[in-house]
Image: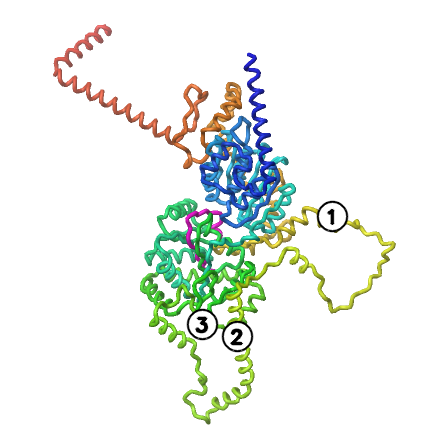
């Protein structure tokens, strides 16, 4: 008895000592600046073993900066480019805080993802890293059965990985309080707000406990997300790595200037001639109509491809992504709305069919390539109306534009902007015409794409005025051919030069001067006009020549010195933005009596505001906005139709202001949500499954497991996933029959198949016995049957008598 009393205390003491030891190791390693490995973070054995199992050896910069802060219990806002390891940055502290499964009711961690694909990707990471912790994970995703998700949440999971829409539906149905959640993660938070989940996120925050720890990871910080971070996080620490390294050093960028109508031919030429069939390539397009159009073109040309866009069915999106990741096809066509958060580790190339209107969007697109030490190339097809956006991009990156001129033939390097030979495009155009000449669907698709592109141009944000002005000045400069597409031999070069000279040929005589004599009235008018404007033409040609000379000198200087534009610091930008501007008006003299004037604000109000968190966070998050346009007509027009007319209030209100409608219900936090979130689905499931009765009897009969058994369970068992059938493990042991207190009403697919097979075996053996009995009767002829019938008849007759 004495041993039994001492053992729990000894277990508690050993566990406390392990926690103190890990804290001491963590503090000591932080003093050493060079110790930056996972072993220096003081992680427990099960978590560290899972990291080694995943193959991680050295933490990435975002992991090295955020994991220690999260382990200390601070709220963190992390910003870094895609592919920098943000998923592991919040999963490793999650498993370190939870450690192992406990008998506590309610989930202890919540991970919110914007899309179903990103949530399943996070689940796969969690299964690998948390393999030796023995934790339970419930998945709440749109498209899955709600009854399975009710059952998963009743099984007492430790971690919930969910999408906001379905999670909000389940929470409202079950009326969950979420007070047991200690650790909350918002992954790709900017995407959560872009998809319109602000109402769901605020309702979720309202139901969480105030003592929680909140972690927010994103590639950018939109304005709405900044307000949400200030409301949902407590004294957050902003870790921003997107300024130091916007593009990966292993990424090579190439820009091809061409006409809009030639982009189809150039894309087909790149995919068939320059990019190897074994390489994986993602093509970004503006709208879903262009995705379907290019998909049809590549299939006719024999290029294996698949497509993903927001209006595509979830099952089809999942199948296409699986085909691409498993290398069943080499090209995937996507829009910006469908490509956020999808991790493709073996991606080699990215092609920007339509150049992005925002520099941050370009960084996000090309961030899919050159991840985790791999190399890659980003090709961009730039039309004339997209050239100002190219200048904005290089101003954002702090790099000069490398123009390929006709005079200086440059070798292939990073960031070159060159022209495409027209003869090459004409050959590919002829091949496309032969493929699509007799296709009626092709002509209809071309019309649909033209209409969609017009709507896209209306919703596309304009470039900066300085870039537009500079591009107009550079219009007279003739670009040379890009080294990647330049002709290989002298014959092709001569042919290309001849065609380009023919294209640039401009006759000196106008149509009024050709084939007429000197007495014609048009001839005399043109002579007078030439004399009047000869000076203007000469000045313009001289200015163009000077501009070309300056341009060539600048290119030569950059090539010799490796000149790179220096990026201004945040303090310099803020001081320049807030500098007083000179006014032409005369400064008015102040008539205020400074000696007797009493202000309504204290004298140190401005300094306190500058030191406050709210203003500081606003300044740090300034300028980190990423705008995405929709990939179909409805999403493009949604920004123009956000305000609705309220008949009762007699004015325009937002979509959340429709409070008097019968289709809206008000939650505890004051948010108005659709009435479809609240139905009788949960109550009907409770009646069918009898889950309450099972929990009551189980709580009375079963005792809580000891800490020793919990630690044993956490050492060898992998993380258990409930509520998502495709990721269930066949090696999981079923509960013994003697421990099952009640018979479940709902059965799994395996149980149904097993019952059917048992019934079929019984029917088979029954028919066999009947056939055997019939054979035995037939072998004894009539005598045996008559004897039996006589006996039976006599017996019956005796009884009747």
The residue lying toward the viewer, choosing from 626 and 254, is 254
As for residue 350 lying within the magenta part, the answer is: yes
The residue lying toward the viewer, choosing from 767 and 376, is 376
Q: Which residue is mark 2?
A: 549
Residue 772 in the figure: left or right of residue 416: left
Residue 142 appears in the figure: no
| Marker disc for residue 608 | 1
Q: Earlier in the sequence, mark 3 or mark 2?
A: 3
| Marker disc for residue 406 | 3
Helix, strand or loop at mark 3: loop
Image quarter where the C terminus lies is top left
The residue lying toward the viewer, choosing from 212 and 290, is 212
| Marker disc for residue 485 | none
- Where on the picture, by quarter, is residue 181? top right
As for residue 306 lying within the magenta part, the answer is: no
Q: Is residue 129 above or below residue 485?
A: above
Residue at the extreme bottom of the image, as rendered: 519
The magenta segment: 336-354
Dominant SS of magenta comes to: loop
């Amino acid at each position: 008895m004495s041993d039994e009393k001492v053992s729990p205390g000894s277990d508690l003491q050993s566990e406390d000592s392990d926690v103190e030891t890990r804290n001491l190791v963590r503090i000591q390693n932080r003093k050493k600046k060079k110790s930056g490995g996972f072993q220096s973070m003081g992680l427990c054995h099960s978590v560290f073993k899972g990291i080694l199992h995943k193959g991680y050896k050295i933490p990435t910069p975002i992991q090295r900066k955020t994991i220690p802060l999260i382990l200390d219990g601070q709220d963190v806002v992390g910003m870094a480019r895609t592919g920098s390891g943000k998923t592991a940055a919040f999963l490793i502290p999650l498993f370190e805080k939870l450690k192992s499964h406990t008998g506590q009711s309610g989930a202890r961690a919540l991970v919110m993802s914007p899309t179903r694909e990103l949530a399943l990707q996070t689940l796969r990471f969690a299964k690998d890293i948390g393999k030796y912790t023995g934790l339970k994970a419930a998945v709440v995703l749109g498209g899955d059965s709600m009854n399975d998700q009710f059952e998963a949440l009743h099984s007492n999971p430790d971690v919930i990985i969910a999408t906001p829409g379905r999670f909000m539906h389940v929470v409202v149905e079950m009326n969950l309080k979420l007070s047991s959640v200690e650790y909350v993660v918002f992954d790709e938070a900017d995407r959560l707000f872009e998809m319109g989940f602000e109402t769901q996120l605020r309702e979720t925050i309202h139901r969480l406990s105030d003592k929680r720890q909140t972690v927010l990871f994103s590639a950018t910080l939109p304005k709405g997300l900044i307000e949400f971070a200030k409301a949902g996080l407590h004294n957050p620490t902003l870790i921003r790595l997107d300024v130091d390294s916007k593009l990966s050093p292993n990424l090579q960028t190439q820009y091809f200037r061409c006409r809009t109508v030639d982009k189809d031919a150039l894309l087909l030429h790149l995919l068939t001639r320059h990019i190897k069939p074994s390489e994986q390539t993602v093509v970004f397009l503006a709208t879903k109509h262009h995705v379907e159009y290019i998909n049809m073109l590549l299939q006719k040309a024999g290029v294996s491809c698949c497509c993903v866009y927001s209006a595509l069915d979830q099952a089809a999106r999942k199948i296409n992504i699986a085909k691409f990741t498993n290398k069943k096809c080499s090209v995937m066509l996507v829009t910006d709305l469908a490509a956020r958060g999808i991790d493709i580790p073996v991606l080699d190339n990215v092609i920007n069919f339509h150049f992005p209107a925002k520099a941050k969007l370009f960084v996000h697109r090309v961030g899919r390539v050159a991840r985790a030490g791999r190399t890659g190339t980003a090709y961009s097809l730039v039309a004339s109306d997209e050239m100002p956006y190219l200048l904005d991009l290089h101003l954002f990156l702090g790099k000069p534009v490398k123009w390929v001129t006709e005079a200086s033939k440059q070798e292939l390097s990073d960031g070159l902007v060159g022209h495409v030979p027209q003869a090459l495009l004409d050959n590919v155009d002829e091949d496309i015409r032969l493929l699509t000449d007799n296709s009626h669907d092709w002509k209809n698709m071309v019309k649909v794409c033209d209409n969609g592109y017009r709507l896209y141009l209306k919703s596309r944000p304009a470039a900066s005025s300085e870039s537009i002005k500079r591009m107009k000045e550079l219009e007279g400069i003739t670009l040379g051919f890009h080294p990647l597409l330049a002709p290989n031999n002298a014959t092709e070069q001569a042919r290309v030069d001849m065609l380009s000279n023919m294209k640039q040929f401009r006759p000196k005589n106008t149509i009024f001067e050709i084939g007429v004599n000197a007495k014609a009235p048009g001839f005399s008018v043109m002579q007078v006009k030439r004399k009047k404007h000869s000076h203007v033409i000469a000045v313009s040609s001289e200015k163009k020549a000077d501009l070309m000379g300056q341009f060539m000198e600048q290119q030569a200087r950059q090539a010799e010195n490796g000149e790179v534009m220096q990026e201004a610091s945040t303090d310099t930008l803020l001081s320049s933005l807030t500098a007083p501007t000179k006014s032409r008006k005369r400064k008015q003299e102040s008539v205020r009596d400074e000696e007797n004037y009493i202000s309504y604000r204290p004298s140190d109000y401005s300094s306190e505001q500058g030191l406050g968190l709210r203003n500081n966070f606003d300044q740090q998050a300034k300028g980190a906005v990423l705008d995405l346009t929709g990939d179909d007509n409805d999403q493009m027009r949604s920004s123009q139709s956000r305000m609705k007319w309220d008949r009762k209030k007699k004015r325009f209100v937002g979509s959340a202001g429709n409070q008097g409608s019968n289709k809206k219900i008000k939650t505890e936090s004051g948010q108005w949500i659709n009435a479809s979130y609240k139905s009788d689905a949960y109550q009907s499931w409770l009646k069918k499954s009898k889950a309450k009765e099972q929990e009551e009897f189980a709580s009375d009969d079963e005792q809580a497991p000891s800490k020793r058994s919990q630690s044993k369970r956490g050492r060898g068992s992998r993380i258990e996933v409930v509520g998502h059938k495709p990721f269930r493990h066949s090696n999981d042991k079923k509960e013994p029959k003697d421990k099952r207190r009640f018979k479940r009403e709902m059965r799994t697919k395996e149980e149904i198949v097993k019952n059917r097979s048992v019934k079929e075996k019984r029917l088979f053996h029954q028919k066999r016995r009947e056939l055997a009995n019939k054979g035995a009767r037939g072998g004894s002829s009539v005598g045996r049957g008559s004897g039996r019938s006589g006996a039976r008849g006599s017996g019956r007759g005796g009884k009747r008598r």
